[in-house]
Structure formats: C-alpha cells, structure tokens
Image (spheres, rainbow, N blue to C red):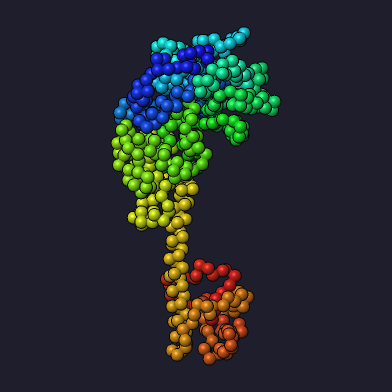
Amino acid sequence: SVGSASALERGEASRRSGDGVVKALCGMGVPWGLARLIQAEDREVALRIFLLDNSGSTNAYDGTFLMPPTGRDRPWMKARCTRWEEIMRMAMQQAEWNAKVGTPCEFILLNPASKRESGFRQGVDCCRVDASQGDEVEQRNALRQMLISNGPRGTTPMTMRLAEIYRRIEMEHMELVNARQRVIIVIVTDGLPTNEYSGLSKEVDRTMFVDILRRLCTDLPVSLVVRLATAEREVVEFFDRVDNEPELALEVLDDIESEAREVCRHGNLWLTYSPLIQTIREGGTFVKLFDVIDERKLTTMEALLLAHLLLQQENDGPPPVDPWKFVKYVEQRIKQFDLVYEPLTQRMTPVIEVINLRTHILPLKSLIPFRRQGITPRIKGAWYRHPLAYIRGGRRRRNEQYVNSMDLERASLEAGLAALSGAASGAQPRANLEDIVPIPVAAVPAKGSGGGAANFPKPEDFVEVEGAANFPDPEDFVAEEDASIDFPPATGRPRWCKTEFRYSI
C-alpha cells in the first residue's frame, strides 16, 4: 500500500542513514555533491511506480542497451535487442538504484498474464522492491523472474492502468500531503494508448489518456516521467505535444544516445551526458537543471551550479565566483575524477569538457587571446553532429578574414589608380577611391580582336566640370580584346563589385 507507515512516514529507523546512502551512491560512481542531493531528494519521494509496457509491439527488434564494462580495460558496449529487453534492463537498473538509495519502488505490467478481478497481485503483475521490508537481492530476483515470465502480449491500455493507480493513490492522498511527499510515476512505453480490446489508437483513446494524466498531476501530489522505447515518428510527436501541456508536470525521455544529441543540439556541449545522468532522469528527479538540459541552453549561473554539483567533494568550500577562476578550478578538479562514457563518440571522456565550458560561461571578447593560440571549442564527434557550434566558429574566422581582405583590396585598388594616373602624366593628382563611378555593363565597349589591354583616353581628354568629372562617351574607347584595368595581383576584383557593373575613371 502507498499509505503504509513504511512507505509514507519513513523515519531514520525504516531507511538507511543519510551517510550510508551517500556512501553507497559514491560507490556506484556518483560524485559526492550529487549523491548528497539525491539523498536529500529521496526524503520527498514516497514511492516510485514504473508502468512497464509489455504489449505485442515491444517484440520489435530495434531496441538498444549499454553493457557496462566487466573489467578495468573493457569498454562500454552498445548492443541491439528487442524493445522489451530494453525495458527489462531499464527496470532492473532502476530496481538496483532505488534499493541503494532506499526509496521503495513498484513495477507494474501493462498486460498481466491473466485477467484479474481487482487490485494488483504481488509477483504476478506487480513486484515491489523495498530495502526496509526484506532482502533486496531476493526482491530483485523476483522482479527478474516476473519480467521473464510475462513477455510481449496484448494491446496498450495505458489509460486503464493509470486509472487504477489513480484510485489507489487517491485513497491515501491526505497521508501524502501530511508527510509532504510525492509519488513519481514512470511510464515506459513504445506506442500510442489504445483500449483493452483493440490495437488501433483512436482519437478518443488519446484524449482519455491525456485526461487521466491531467487528473493525476492536478488532483494528486504526483510527478510523471515518460520513457520512450521507440523512435517512431508518430509516437514521438504525440508525446512531444503532451509534454508541451502547461498544466502537466511531465518529462519525456528517449534513449541515452538521442538525449545526448538533444543536449548538444541545444548548446550544452560542455556536459558529457553519461549513463549516470540518464539513470537519474529516468527515475524522476526534482532537480530542474536536469530537466532543461535537453530543452534549452543553460545560462551562465546554471552552468556554474551544475558543473560544481558534478565536481563537488566532501569538505569542499564554496567554488570561485569569478568565471575565469572557476574555469581554473574545474581544470584542476577534473583530473581527480574518472572518465565517463560519452554516447555520441562512444568513448571515455571527462564528465566536463573544460574548453567548451570556457566558451559557455565566458564572454566572447575574453576568448580572443585563446583563439589566437589556436584554442577553439571542442566538438563531440563529427562536425555534422553539431553543426551550430561548427558554423559559429567558422563564421568568426570568416568575418576576420573578410575585414583583412577588404583592407588589402582597398590598398590594392588605390595603388592601381595611382599607377594608372602616374603613367598618363607625372603631374596629375592621385585619383581617390571616391572618384570611382559605377557604369552599366551596356556602356562598356565590346571586345575587339586586337591587343591585350585597354587603350584609355589621355588625361587631356577630360573636361573639368564643377563638382564631378566629365567622362568620355563609350565610343571614344578603342576596343581591344580582354580590355581590363591591370591592378596589382594581390586580391583581384574587389569583393563588393557587383556583377552588373564595371568600374572606370
């Protein structure tokens, strides 16, 4: 029962001490600062309920899972599997995680082996893992046996199962409120909601599903997480629309590789999206920084807080406030932590990319000395996986090259004009750049069959007119082949010269 004393009013006698939980989490590779935060957050969670979709569509062989290293020299391995196997592995991982933390959790099958009259049956279609009620190893073995015995079958009646969970939590609503605790419901599915007797998802089924989610979030102290085990476009788009509902306390997650790609796509390249972060988010967390890393770029203060959380150790003082000093602090502290698995490159990397963190929290002007030394933001994986960062760096380089080339072109143009006027007459004043007047292409004489250079009129052919130069008519030109002004070969034709004009003096 959700409202039992061991689930709602869990004191120090019914759960592990705070130091024991932190020590257990640190043994699983969790940084000390993050372990303390998880332990404090655990006191606000009365129960985690995992609704596991074992419909017939989970038999599709397009799932993936990560095999952790079995030895120090053995890397992480990515393997293919069915969707149901992916859901099973995620459930067993969450059972072990919550047993270490001390949070009770229940795993409910969407389609039981046989039709029941009322309530959930322990060990048949529901399994509870609670370290305060017995040996956690035996409980996890019972969970594994239940998952193996109940393979994919039936439809996706998520609305019906959520209504049963709603009635169960509603009976003990006041106990949850008095204990200031919440229930986290994690829906692990690969399809759209249907009814019990049809595998076709209709509009009424989807409307009823959204309504029961809204009732859970509005009437009860419940937080929702949807973990998708598919990449089907229709399913992903539907749950994205549900996630955009403002009144729903809902978080939609995908597999670890897709989530890592979203984190990088939104500009958080400095963070390595490790399996640890994925596990924390799959179980539901109240840390809002983990909720928004795949939705938008973190602000400077948010990046500083999250980086400090991932690097904090016991008995540490406050981190430096100045961004420059904080980057130096991260550079020294990151050497004390083990490498973590990066799903995009499939390699072991630091939990924080220092170069990318520098570009994230420091102003662009302060990075100019580093860019001159060849230090640029590091791109995770191939450049086409993160085109925004690649284009951003390329645009800055192109802008600098453009300014330098314009200065060279202006000097080259003025030198050409001076040489041209000096060849005509040594006493002629030097021509200015402002004297260049665009003339339509139609006014340029056609190419002839002789010579290789333009035969320009002599300076005395010009008639001084107040305010402007009186240019000769086009017929005054002697047509020769490939007529052009012989500028110095530094840069060629100026970049701002439009194709429909030629410049002459």
Give whichever of 371, 176 is nearer the camera.
176
Residue closer to the observer: 44 or 416? 44
Q: Residue at x 38, y 28 (%)?
A: 35
Q: In the picture shown, does residue 274 fall above or below 187?
A: below
Report whether 56 appears left or right of 356.
Answer: right
Q: Is residue 71 visible?
A: yes
Q: Front-most of 268 and 13? A: 13
Name the residue located 54 percent from the left edge and 17 percent from the top edge: 175
The tally of labels here is: 0
Residue 90 picture location, percent across and down: 47, 23
Image coordinates for residue 367, horizontal then vertical, percent: 39, 53
Q: Residue most toward the top? A: 117
Identify which residue is drawn at 38% across, 56% down. 368
If the image is split into quadrants, where does the C terminus sit? Answer: bottom right
In the visual, does 208 lie left or right of 281? right
Residue 304 screen position, x and y as percent? 41, 42
Q: Is residue 25 left or right of residue 61?
A: left
Residue 261 shows in this picture = no
Residue drawn at point x = 41 percent, y = 10 percent:
134
Q: Quadrant of residue 120?
A: top right
